[in-house]
Image: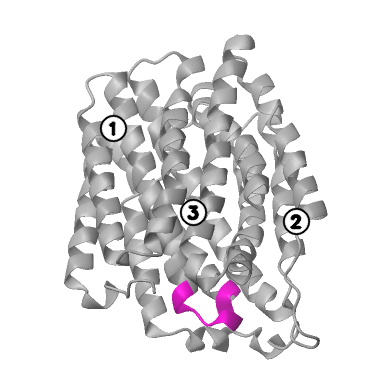
Amino acid sequence: MGFASLFMDISSELIHSLLPLFMVGTLGASMVAVGLVEGIAEATASITKVFSGALSDYLGKRKWLMVLGYGMAALTKPIFPLAHSMGWVMAARFIDRIGKGIRGAPRDALVADIAPPHMRGAAYGLRQSLDSVGALAGPLLAVLLMLWLADNLRLAMWFSVIPAVICVVLLAIWVRDPEKPAGEARANGKRLHWSSVKELPLQYWLIVLIGAVFTLARFSEAFLVLRAQSMGVAMALVPIVMVVMNIVYAAGAYPAGAASDRMQPRTLMLLGLALLVAADVVLALAPNVWMVYVGSALWGLHMAVTQGLLSKLVADRAPQSLLGTAFGMFNLVSGVAMLAASLIAGWLWDAHGPSLTFWAGAGFAGVTALALLLAPGTRGQPAA
């Protein structure tokens, strides 16, 4: 699953590191339009995760839902270079994110199914680390292609099809659902109902709330690309900002995930928020592109510290029979928050410029940290 994530992220991040430039430069979109496209895309993925997660609990099988989701994402890759209007881009992002929604919750639940409970943090960190290697390779490939192809955005985006196909083949051939006792696979059939949500405990919903507020502070990474462009970076070199972010993200995700098996969750979450505040402040004040790279590195470090941790906390606090549903609801709420965050970021950028956009992100992160400090129920228990 980690290597499948790696290849799909090579494909997706090649597209995503060029797409903001394509939307603004080629299609003439505003920053609000960019925020709307990115926000709706992530919200769509999150809504879909609710249903795919619950369905995977009901079926007791997760693999083929993952293959379907990754397959849909692969099918959208040719649409981006063919797009001649924002409507085409919106449609491609919409279908791509439906695919992400279909695969996301079953994949996260399958990690929990496979990994020993005392190593869940490390397992999520490992998958996220491989995912981040792909997210590093994608923008790096975009830079090389743009230099080779003389800034031909459309032709560069066509190369995203190859790793997407490799991802689907890997999953279809080598990933398997864990064996279950006879009769257990459909034992939860009665749970394919909204009433199942009521069985999720209060501690789980507290994690959902924290994740949502956290997401408000962390808008779409498309704005990192646009921040680099605003500093006058040559178009072919703009994706380097994503390369820098993902080098740090990939290097830090597994150690941070392993640390979450031993440390207090709140300590790591506060560290992640502090890193996000630092990233936003650096990006707001950046006098040159080198400081944009520093801010992007801090952004990647905060992602490494927090993303695997949030998945571990959801897995630890949800019943085993409702893991897919739990991840689906978590991602639904986070996706709605991402839509709001990206719209706010786009509006602030258009109205007041990039600096205020990142100052607002720092403010949201500070409020989240304060709420976390005042909420004693988030302390959690250290791993045995």
Name the residue: 56% across, 52% down: 127
Q: Position of residue 171 (x, y in %)?
A: 75, 52
Q: Which residue is mark 3?
A: 125
Q: Position of residue 7 (x, y in %)?
A: 66, 40
Which of disc 1 and disc 3 is earlier in sequence? 3
Is residue 207 shown to the viewer in this render? yes
Tag 2 and tag 1, C-beta contact below 8 Å: no
Q: Which residue is mark 1?
A: 354
Q: Main secondary structure of the magenta part?
A: helix
Q: Is residue 317 magenta?
A: yes
Q: Nearer the viewer's eye, disc 2 or disc 1?
A: 2
Q: Is residue 63 left or right of residue 319?
A: right
Identify which residue, 310 or 39, lies in the foreground: 310
Tag 3 and tag 2, C-beta contact below 8 Å: no
Image quadrant in which you'd find residue 265: bottom left
Which of disc 2 and disc 3 is earlier in sequence? 2
Residue range highlighted in magenta: 316-324
Which of disc 1 and disc 2 is earlier in sequence? 2
Label 3, label 1: how many angstroms apart (C-alpha)? 32 Å
Q: Secondary structure at mark 2?
A: helix
Number of residues whose C-alpha sits closer than 10 Å to that of mark 2, classed few (under 14), some (14–19) or many (20 or more): many
Q: Secondary structure at mark 3?
A: helix
Up/down of 154 relative to 129, above or below: above
Name the residue: 42% across, 50% down: 255
Up/down of 278 relative to 68, above or below: above
Q: Position of residue 245 (x, y in %)?
A: 41, 34
